[in-house]
Amino acid sequence: DLERLVEEATVDANGESEQVCGFYTMLEDELELPFNTAVLGADVTVERVDLTDDDHIVVVCRRGQKRQRLPILDLPLPEPPPQGWEWIEAYRHWAKWAR
């Protein structure tokens, strides 16, 4: 199933940068935001997905008034996971062999 999602995200992509953009687009469209999770024992709210200048997908997490960007590859998912979580898993699956 992850292979099907990888194919869907990268079908028209030429090169790694465009593949990352494909995943970013799918995450923006399919991942239900905001959602709460715990990062290093602290409860945070994942507010949005972002793409860095060097083609990495990150999430913007908020705790109180503070915000921090975290690579989506390192994001722990809550139980139950948010709708669209399978796109995070597909990106992780792709990143294992692409990067």
Image (cartoon, helix red, strand yellow):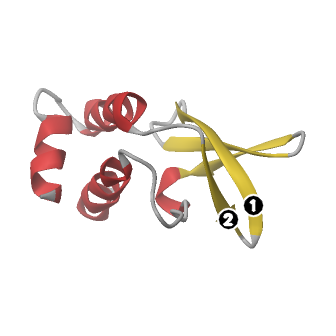
Which x, y percent locates residue 94? 25, 55
Residue at mark 2: 38
Q: Position of residue 87 (x, y in %)?
A: 31, 48
Describe the element under mark 2 as helix, strand or loop.
strand
Image coordinates for residue 98, horizontal then vertical, percent: 26, 55
Residue at the front extreme, as displayed: 80
Residue 91 to residue 19: above or below: below
Q: Which residue is depicted at the point 10% across and 33% down?
A: 11
Determine crowd level at label 2: few under 14, some 14-19, many 20+ residues with C-alpha closer than 10 A. some
Image point 69% across, 65% down: which residue?
A: 39
Residue 43 is marked as 1
Q: Residue furthest bottom?
A: 41
Which of pointers 2 and 1 lies earlier in the amino acid sequence?
Answer: 2
Location of residue 69 (image quadrant): top right
Mark 1 residue type: Asp
Which quadrant of the structure image shows residue 48?
A: top right
Q: Is residue 29 left or right of residue 56?
A: left
As shown in the figure, which amino acid type bears the numbered disc 2? Ala
- Check whether the beta carbons of the residues at disc 2 and disc 1 lie within 8 A of each other: yes
Screen quadrant of the C terminus: bottom left
Horizontally, residue 26 falls left or right of residue 58, namely: left
